[in-house]
Image: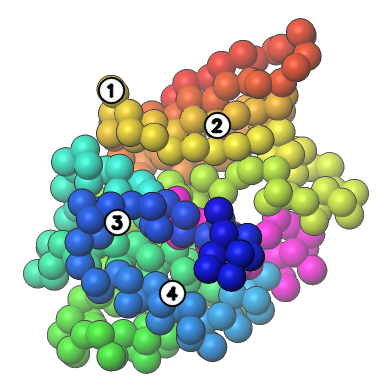
């Protein structure tokens, strides 16, 4: 896929771009996505927040690419869940409109890791205070004061719940939590792996070839994960499973991991959650 200039397009928001009017009938989300991309402070923060985890701690990527992938998959999840008639309560509980649901998700996905610029430890809590300041400014052109307070409450709730310490109380927050765990393909661990990192998180993510989201049969969403070897089981069973459990969407999402490696000695052929 390429843009009008013929240059290859990035994978960012590919599900958002391909979604039909069923999922995003209102122009609000489109305006928000454009505004995020044009916002100098947000784009600078996404670069800065990667220094502590990657440069100083040797962790996986938590910068712009991670945010693009998580936002894309969060909006994919939202689209598929809406197609499956799942009710989203966050915006509705606040008296906001249905069109605000994906906006909450997109902004939470964009700002969920900004706390890493303070420290990786307890970064979700740092993200709350930093995102709150950004949202005060960013939301002003789009919402009046009462609406800004409601949107801010729901976005911050979704941000703090992306880690296992807090349980999501809304479907929007549940989507954010699961989407964060879906950035697991091998490219995510490229930098620490090339530096010699051989921890289980790094090695197992090298084994994840592709993550795909589909409409499901027994549940609205089917997540299909292709692994090249059994090491990928750690990503699925230990990390992604922890994101799914307690998300409030356990009954709506099915996860299937398939070993597509060429070796005849496959310890794990298939894993289903």
Alpha carbon separation for disc pair 2 and 1: 17 Å
Residue count near mark 1 (Cα–Cα under 10 Å), binned few <14, some 14–19, many ≥20:
few
Residue at (54% x, 38% y) in the render: 211
Q: Which of 131 and 270 is in front in this view?
A: 270
Q: Which mark, residue 225?
A: 2
* Residue on which the image places disc 4: 128
Residue 54 appears in view = yes
Reply above or below: 12 against 244. below
- Nearer-N-terminus badge (1/4): 4
Residue at the farthest top position? 264
Q: Name the residue under label 3.
A: 172
Mark 2 and mark 3: span between their CA atoms? 23 Å
Predominant SS of the magenta segment: helix
**Label 1 near label 2: C-beta < 8 Å?**
no
Q: How far apart are marks 1 and 4 (CA)?
A: 36 Å
Q: What residue is rendered at 47% in x and 54% in y?
A: 14
User: Residue 181: x percent and y percent?
Assistant: 52, 47
Check disc 1 and report the residue beneath it: 218
Measure the C-alpha gap from mark 3 to mark 4: 16 Å
């Amino acid at each position: 896929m390429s843009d009008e200039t013929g240059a290859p397009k990035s994978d960012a928001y590919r599900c958002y771009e391909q979604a039909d009017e069923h999922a995003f009938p209102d122009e609000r989300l489109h305006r928000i996505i454009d505004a995020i991309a044009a916002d100098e402070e947000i784009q600078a923060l996404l670069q800065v927040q990667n220094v502590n985890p990657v440069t100083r701690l040797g962790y996986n990527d938590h910068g712009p690419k991670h945010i693009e992938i998580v936002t894309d998959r969060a909006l994919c999840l939202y689209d598929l869940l809406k197609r499956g008639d799942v009710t989203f309560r966050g915006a509705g509980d606040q008296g906001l409109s249905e069109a605000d649901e994906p906006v909450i998700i997109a902004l939470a996905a964009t700002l969920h890791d900004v706390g890493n610029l303070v420290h990786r430890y307890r970064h979700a809590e740092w993200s709350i205070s930093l995102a709150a300041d950004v949202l005060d400014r960013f939301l002003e052109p789009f919402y009046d004061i009462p609406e800004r307070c409601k949107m801010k409450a729901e976005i911050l709730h979704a941000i703090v719940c992306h880690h296992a310490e807090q349980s999501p109380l809304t479907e929007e927050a549940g989507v954010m939590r699961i989407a964060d765990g879906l950035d697991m393909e091998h490219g995510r661990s490229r930098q620490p792996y090339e530096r010699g990192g051989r921890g289980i998180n790094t090695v197992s993510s090298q084994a994840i070839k592709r993550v795909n989201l589909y409409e499901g049969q027994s549940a609205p969403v089917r997540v299909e994960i292709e692994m090249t070897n059994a090491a990928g089981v750690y990503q699925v069973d230990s990390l992604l499973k922890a994101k799914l459990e307690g998300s409030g969407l356990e009954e709506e999402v099915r996860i299937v991991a398939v070993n597509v490696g060429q070796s005849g000695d496959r310890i794990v052929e298939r894993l289903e959650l």
